[in-house]
Amino acid sequence: MLFIAMSVAFIAAIILTPLVIKLAYRIGAVDRPNYRKVHARIMPRIGGLAIFGAFIIGYAILLPKDEHATGILVGAVIIVLIGFLDDMLEITAKAKLSGQLLAALVVVLWGGLQIEFINLPFIGQLDFGYLSIPITIIWIIGITNAINLIDGLDGLAAGVSTIALIAITVMAALMGDFFVAATASILAASSLGFLIFNFHPAKIFMGDTGSLFLGFMISVLALLGFKNVAVVSLVIPIIMLGVPISDTFFAIVRRVRMKQSITAADKSHLHHCLLRVGFSHRQAVLTIYGIAILFGAAAVLFSQATVWGALLLIFVMLIVIELFVELIGLAGANYRPLLNLVRMIGK
């Protein structure tokens, strides 16, 4: 039955996307070129409606049961509405954040999804108490915006999200969590169907309607699959989402170093850096896909490792990420502490 639901979601996305393209032009939901964007012509940008519609159709066929399901779906509707309003009217950052906060509150307070505790190696259980609600909300909003930030090249956010959802599906299946595995796989099928029209050269953008929806669902599903577990296991969703999280983290580092607001827009995200060093549009996207796949594979390997093995894997990954960041200038052209240290040692 799950395969049928996934197939229907995939086909529904293929059918709905051309209809959404026509709707976008009709209502003026289009993205116009500017100095920060890499596209050179007006593009429809509410493709997220096709992903959302396809997901709902596929989900309705299977109706996987979970105590948090209603809160998640209501939160998803809210986040899609906020994204749609932003695509149509370009609402303020505060208004968009308020909508994300509302969606997160619905999941946490109505849906009852919270990180209540983690088990720390060598220490024992750490209860978050009253902090469980703000920690959960920060996670949801943070990942939601991380996916939104990487939506800068044709097919990038859709592809990275699909890879992350597949990783979540695999991990949830290994843990025996049918709801998370089923929901993530249906959403992955919906995103993949949309990607047919969104890969370079794109015929439509997903817009905030899509990137916020995908980010929200990924954050919630990752949290649902790994809440209240050992801290080592809690790192798994972070590794799975390594591309958007790393891009967001180093964007903050870059803006702090440049004495800019951390919410200031710029043209130095991962995809911009790859284009700057000579990658073509398609090469940059495929490279980031490859990185996302490596993160997903690392998450699976991480889940099977011992505590010391997991800690060693984290250390190696952090070193590799730092070197990559410094080589492409993701945190700024003059940010090279590790490379400078290597040069000093080599002298």
Image (spheres, rainbow, N blue to C red):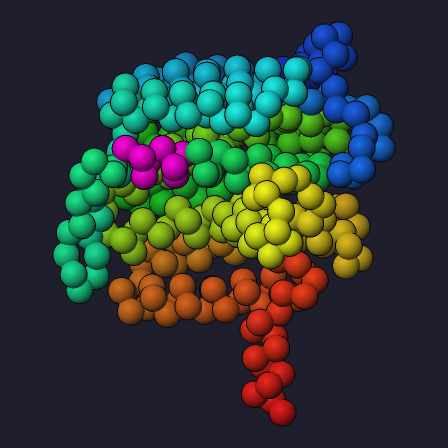
Question: Looking at the rendering, in which quadrant would you find the C terminus?
Answer: bottom right
In the current view of this chain or complex, which residue is farthest to the bottom? 347
Q: Answer yes or no: is residue 10 visible.
A: no
State the extent of the magenta-drawn residues as a range: 133-140
Question: Looking at the rendering, in which quadrant would you find the N terminus?
Answer: top left
In the current view of this chain or complex, which residue is farthest to the left? 124
From the viewer's perspective, is residue 143 above or below residue 205? below
**At x 42% / y 68%, what residue is drawn?**
315
Q: Main secondary structure of the magenta part?
A: helix
**At x 55% / y 49%, what residue is drawn?**
252
**At x 30% / y 26%, what residue is drawn?**
108
| Pick the front one: 99 or 120 | 99
In the current view of this chain or complex, which residue is farthest to the right? 40
| Pick the front one: 108 or 213 | 108
In the current view of this chain or complex, which residue is farthest to the front? 259
Count of picture labels: 0
On the picture, is 173 further left or further right than 207? left
Q: Does the magenta-highlighted stretch encompass residue 112? A: no
Residue 174 in picture, x, y percent from top left: 31, 45
Residue 190 in picture, x, y percent from top left: 54, 26
